[in-house]
Image (cartoon, rainbow, N blue to C red):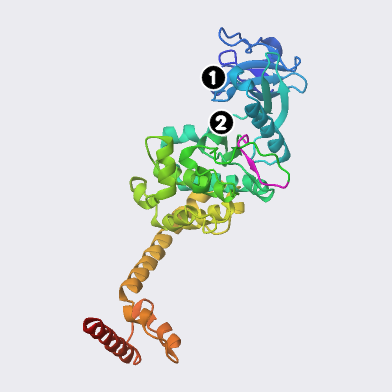
């Protein structure tokens, strides 16, 4: 392993220069980790002397993340260590331990690899994970506001692949959000890692439940209606909703449901519908072909919602004119996806406009009497032929007598009521 003498990042032995500071890297054997005035863990060795902490990576509500050197195997790892006050809460510690158990049981190239669960010398707990060099989707959106279609499709496809095994095992992530989608840059595009399985809902038989009935777990902006209500009947389709909310934000630059407080956000999720993405993201040229996809993903009832993240990824790719499925797009170079989308979008938009025009004509031109007319022999066949490509045809002969009979009956009824 090598390190940078300026930022103290750790790199593989075949690296030459730090991409952040431009400094020539030196072997860790020739350097010493720095000391931190406010954090005694930096520079120390933890968990029985196995992990040597070199720097602070990030802070969160639950704990702090460090980059460390695993002295036993000579690799860079991430240590996620609970804050002291969190380490005193039994439920938080149990969730932390379950994050290790679930992640370790779901080895997948698109799920962060969790290596160990350890106690630290300062009476806390640590998750030992693979160290990832890149950035969270949240950081990207703060900087760039939106993602280009090809980057979105590739990312979404990999998220779908990462979640499929968990969902097949009846494990619901329950906290999918841009903060928990990590993007590792490669020559072909992003390589996605799903983070933080600490809030999972395990619906498998005999699984231990850590959530009190009626409580909500997750981030309000990305919560499904059933999750917002803390319902027991919550399955993988809650994750479909959350991923759809992420997609919406990636193309429009805003979350689908907005309010000033957490409870008001949840009320909005349960009682209103988001703007179509083509309208909310008009400034970014979001195609109208994406609107019906988001509508299907944001159905309030799980039974009416798109049934899987894989199908959601397929529909999003198809909305941009791509052929194939998310399994193809997950490994397709981003430049190739961009070229295919550019070539296909004119035809996609033309088909969408034609379909919308036909639907509008059909809705406006359908004879209202046909829907309420009394059935008669052959009526069903006649009604089926009333609309051809959205254009109303000549009114069938049975309609006029039926309407006349209904009118006579209505007049007789009115006369009877007046007489009484």
Residue 291: percent from left, percent from top: 42, 55
Residue identified by numbered label 1:
22
What stretch of residues is rendered in magenta?
Answer: 197-205
- Is 316 displayed left or right of 168 in the figure? left
Camera-near label (2 vs 1) is 2
Kindly state the secondary structure of the residue where label 2 is placed: loop
- Is 72 displayed left or right of 40 in the figure? right
As displayed, is residue 15 above or below residue 368? above
The quadrant in which the N terminus is found is top right
Q: Which residue occupies 46% across, 48% down?
A: 149
Residue 145: percent from left, percent from top: 41, 37
Q: Is residue 200 magenta?
A: yes
Residue 298: percent from left, percent from top: 47, 52
- Is 116 displayed left or right of 162 in the figure? right
Q: Which residue occupies 33% across, 69% down?
A: 360
Q: Residue 264 or 391: which is nearer the viewer?
A: 264
Q: Residue 239 or 213: which is nearer the viewer?
A: 213
Q: Is residue 308 magenta?
A: no
Question: Quadrant location of residue 51?
Answer: top right
Residue 134 got which mark?
Answer: 2
Kindly state the secondary structure of the residue where label 1 is placed: loop
């Amino acid at each position: 392993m090598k390190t940078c003498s300026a930022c103290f990042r750790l790199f593989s032995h075949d690296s030459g220069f730090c991409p952040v500071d431009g400094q020539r890297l030196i072997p860790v054997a020739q350097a010493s980790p720095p000391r931190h005035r406010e954090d005694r863990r930096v520079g120390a060795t933890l968990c029985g002397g196995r992990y040597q902490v070199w720097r602070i990576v990030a802070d969160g509500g639950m704990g702090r993340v460090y980059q460390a050197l695993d002295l036993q195997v000579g690799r860079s790892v991430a240590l996620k260590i609970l804050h002291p006050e969190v380490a005193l809460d039994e439920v938080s510690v149990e969730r932390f331990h379950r994050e290790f158990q679930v992640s370790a049981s779901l080895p997948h190239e698109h799920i962060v690899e969790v290596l160990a669960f350890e106690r630290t010398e300062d009476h806390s707990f640590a998750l030992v994970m693979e160290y990832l060099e890149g950035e969270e989707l949240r950081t990207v959106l703060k900087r760039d506001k939106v993602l280009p279609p090809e980057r979105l499709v590739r990312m979404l496809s990999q998220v779908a692949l990462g979640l499929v095994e968990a969902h097949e095992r009846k494990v619901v992530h329950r906290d999918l959000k841009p903060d928990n989608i990590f993007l590792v840059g490669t020559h072909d595009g992003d390589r996605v890692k799903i983070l933080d399985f600490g809030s999972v809902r395990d619906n498998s038989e005999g699984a231990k439940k850590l959530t009190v009935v009626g409580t909500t777990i997750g981030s309000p902006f990305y919560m499904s209606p059933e999750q917002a209500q803390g319902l027991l009947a919550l399955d993988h389709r809650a994750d479909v909703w959350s991923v759809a909310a992420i997609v919406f934000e990636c193309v429009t630059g805003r979350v689908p449901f907005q309010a000033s407080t957490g409870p008001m956000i949840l009320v909005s999720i349960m009682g209103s519908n988001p703007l179509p993405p083509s309208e909310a993201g008009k400034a970014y040229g979001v195609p109208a072909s994406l609107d019906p996809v988001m509508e299907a993903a944001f159905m309030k009832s799980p039974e009416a919602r798109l049934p899987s993240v894989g199908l959601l990824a397929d529909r999003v790719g198809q909305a941009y004119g791509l052929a194939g499925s998310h399994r193809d797009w997950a490994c397709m170079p981003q430049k190739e996806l961009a070229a295919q989308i550019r070539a296909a979008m004119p035809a996609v938009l033309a088909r969408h406009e034609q379909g919308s025009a036909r639907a509008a004509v059909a809705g406006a031109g359908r004879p209202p009497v046909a829907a309420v007319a009394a059935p008669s022999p052959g009526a069903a066949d006649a009604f089926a032929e009333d609309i051809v490509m959205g254009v109303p045809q000549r009114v069938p002969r049975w309609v006029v007598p039926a309407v006349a009979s209904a009118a006579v009956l209505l007049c007789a009824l009115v006369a009877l009521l007046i007489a009484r």
